[in-house]
Image: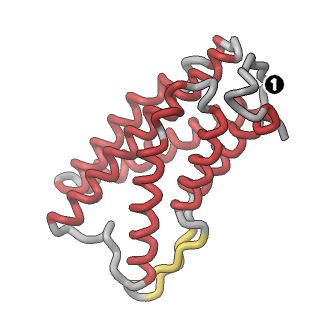
Amino acid sequence: MKPLRDIFWGFILLFFTINFGVGLAKVVILPPFVGYLMILSATGRLKPIAKHFRKIDFPLVALSIFSLITFVLSLMGIPIANQVDPVSILLILISDGIYLWMMYLMFYGLRDVAAAAGNAEYSTQFTDLFPFYVIFRVIIGIGLLIFPTLTILALIANFILHIVFLVRLSRFSKIPLEFTVDPDDVDPASFIE
């Protein structure tokens, strides 16, 4: 299903950015905001069958804008993520909160897609990951300030969790799904290749 594959590739761009550093400035190949915009486009095509995707626009747009701003600032040699001043920490915490909100809507939106297709087997395979995302994000956030060693372990666990999510999403996107969609709500061609 094309929108699910587009979501998969959007997350690939989010999770695996390539950075080249030169002094304080860094050049980002495949910046995350491109991934957010890809996901935004794909979830828009799934809104008629997934009620949680009807609410995902704001967090995706907010994360795209934040990502674009940090991308531009990093090109100018002003990295937000490496700062320990209160404003940078607050911005990072806010973006993490919006990211968790987006992931919540993503997991439950994927559950909605599976349920609409009558595929109960896949309906909880994403939602059971969400508590782990919250736990690791909290550990990473606290660990950055207090326990740097714990942060490294949480980052490794978070990376593994992202891989598990991508594998599940990849498998899910290859399953032929059949929906009953009102033709007035959506262009049926948006679901196929």
- Tally of numbered tags: 1
- Kindly indicate the quadrant of the structure image that contains residue 115: top right
Image position of 80 with respect to 62: above or below = below
Image position of 124 with respect to 4: above or below = above
Residue at the far bottom in the pictured view: 23
Where's residue 136, x and y in %?
35, 40
Scheme of image coloration: secondary structure
Q: Residue at x 67, y 28 (%)?
A: 185
The amino acid type of the residue labelled 1 equals Pro
Q: Residue at x 60, y 57 (%)?
A: 13
Could you say which is closer to the camera, residue 190 or residue 185? 185
Where's residue 68, x and y in %?
46, 67
- Crowd around label 1: few <14 · some 14–19 · many ≥20 (10 Å): few
- Please name the residue that numbered disc 1 is placed on: 176
Position of the C terminus, as image quadrant, is top right
Q: Residue at x 64, y 43 (%)?
A: 42
Where's residue 116, x and y in %?
65, 16
Residue at the far front in the pictured view: 184
Where's residue 27, x and y in %?
52, 79
In this picture, residue 76 sits left or right of residue 54: left
SS for tag 1?
loop
Q: Residue at x 69, y 14 (%)?
A: 119
Could you say which is closer to the camera, residue 53 or residue 124? 53
Position of the N terminus, as image quadrant, is top right
